[in-house]
């Protein structure tokens, strides 16, 4: 049965809005080419969306073209404001953007372990309110939060974890109380990083891949056939608990020491660097291990001002690649993703040099062809993924078809 005229209009409007968000401002002619719709249909939907306040003329295409055909139509960006939070064990970062994702204000705040739960929550919420004010936004439509730990797939809530600060769980409720009307959504940080790398980073050409997170902690995100997989309990990718050779024991249900985390966590990598005499300064909120990894890469690639001996750097990167290959080969054996992205600050610091060494070892360990790539977004992937997720969810409501 063919769609009714009102349903067809709603479908066309949503398609046009989605294209404007993905591609940026477009002319009516470009919308016609991208949608395959007739010229009169495109003219009608542009008029309808403009009258409804969804789109507006934002300029003209080309330097010589003038007139109605040259008008560029773009989404009314201030129709809604969004916030994204990257919640870490030691603090958080916040950005506020408009509906098309342009960052209007941002800030970060360290929160030490000595601060009590109540003060930590108050400082965190106050930071969000301050950034919101600096952005000139009256209210938030959606808040996307990336946090370590398990997210209950049924409730969408951050589950209890003995390894995380208590203020993490309290923060969500406090934001919902202080920001009435805002939709607050929480997602595992590694999952958000994978979504960002898939949309804007190293995995843009892959519908199936695994992101191995190498930051302060370890984790993995699994994307199969374009869909993020969370598992029955939300624990897909808890690779830190993977039992591996080369550790002093086995992990437990509450402690990943003895698992892959003992080989690839930031503290373990920092110790490995020290054993090889490799040092380096971390940048900003990076884990300390990112500095030595970056300096080692600089040394082996011939950077003139590298402060690490090339021979020591070679041995360190080889030893680190040996460790990471255990995790990557395990992922390949179970999932056969074809591509593993080394994400997080440490994966980004290692770049292609570290990824190439890991790939070489995986080829010897696994019969399954597995490309290993460095992440392009580093630690910023979590915040970017949270913002992309907030934008996607907001547009489903903001872009409800006119008249519905």
Image (cartoon, rainbow, N blue to C red):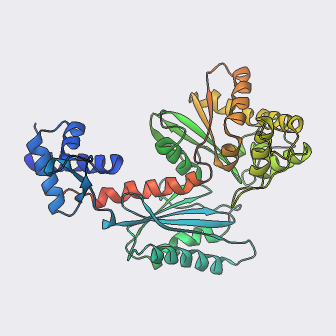
Q: Does 330 sit left or right of 45 as displayed? A: right
Q: Which residue lies furthest to the top in this view?
A: 367
The relative height of residue 339 versus residue 170 in the rendered view (above or below) is above
Residue lying at the far front in this picture: please name it.
64
The quadrant of the picture occupied by the N terminus is top left
Q: Is residue 274 above or below residue 146?
A: above
Res 404 seen here: no
Q: Is residue 134 above or below residue 354?
A: below
- Asked whether the viewer can see residue 362, the reply is yes
Q: Which quadrant, please, contains the C terminus?
A: bottom left
Residue at the image position 48 percent from the left and 37 percent from the top? 204
Residue at the (71%, 34%) spot, across then down: 353
Compared with residue 347, is residue 185 higher up or lower down, i.e. above or below? below
Residue 316: horizontal and vertical position, in percent?
84, 38
Q: Which residue is drawn at 85% across and 43% down?
A: 249
* Percent of width and height locating residue 344: 64, 48
In this rendering, position of residue 343 left or right of residue 98? right
Total label count? 0
Residue 385 place in picture, x, y as percent:
50, 52
Q: Which of 326 and 375 is in front in this view?
A: 375
| Residue in the foreground of this view, choosing between 240 and 273 | 273
Residue at 86% x, 34% y is 315
Residue 8, picture quadrant = top left
Q: Where is residue 237 in the image (x, y as percent from the top left)?
A: 61, 43
């Amino acid at each position: 049965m063919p769609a009714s005229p009102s349903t067809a209009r709603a479908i066309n409007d949503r398609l046009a809005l989605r294209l404007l968000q993905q591609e940026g401002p477009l002319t009516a002619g470009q919308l016609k080419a991208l949608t395959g719709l007739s010229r009169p249909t495109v003219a009608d939907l542009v008029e309808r969306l403009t009258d409804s306040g969804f789109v507006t003329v934002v300029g003209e295409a080309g330097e010589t073209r003038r007139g109605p055909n040259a008008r560029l139509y773009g989404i009314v960006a201030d129709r809604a404001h969004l916030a994204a939070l990257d919640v870490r064990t030691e603090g958080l970062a916040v950005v506020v953007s408009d509906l098309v994702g342009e960052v209007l204000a941002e800030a970060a705040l360290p929160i030490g372990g000595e601060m009590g739960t109540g003060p930590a929550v108050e400082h965190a919420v106050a930071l969000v309110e301050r950034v919101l004010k600096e952005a000139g936004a009256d209210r938030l439509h959606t808040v996307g939060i990336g946090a370590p730990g398990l997210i209950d797939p049924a409730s969408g809530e951050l589950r209890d974890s003995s390894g995380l600060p208590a203020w993490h769980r309290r923060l969500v409720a406090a934001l919902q109380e202080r920001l009435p009307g805002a939709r607050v959504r929480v997602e595992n940080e590694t999952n958000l990083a994978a979504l960002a790398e898939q949309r804007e980073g190293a995995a843009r050409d892959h519908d199936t891949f695994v992101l191995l997170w190498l930051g302060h902690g370890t984790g993995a995100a699994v994307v199969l056939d374009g869909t993020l997989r969370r598992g029955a309990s939300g624990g897909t990718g808890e690779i830190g608990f993977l039992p591996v050779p080369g550790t002093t024991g086995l992990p437990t249900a509450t402690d990943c020491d003895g698992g892959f985390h003992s080989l690839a966590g930031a503290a373990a990598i920092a110790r490995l660097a020290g054993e090889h005499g490799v040092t380096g300064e971390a940048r900003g909120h990076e884990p300390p291990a990112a500095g030595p990894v970056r300096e080692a890469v600089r040394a082996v690639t011939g950077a003139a001002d590298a402060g690490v001996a090339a021979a020591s750097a070679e041995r360190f990167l080889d030893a680190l690649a040996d460790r990471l290959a255990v995790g990557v080969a395990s992922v390949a054996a179970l999932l056969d993703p074809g591509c593993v992205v080394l994400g997080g600050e440490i994966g980004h610091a290692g770049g292609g040099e570290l990824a190439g060494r890991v790939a070489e070892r995986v080829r010897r360990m696994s019969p399954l062809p597995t490309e290993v790539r460095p992440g392009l977004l580093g630690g910023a992937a979590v915040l970017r993924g949270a913002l992309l997720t907030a934008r996607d969810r907001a547009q489903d409501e903001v872009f409800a078809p006119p008249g519905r």
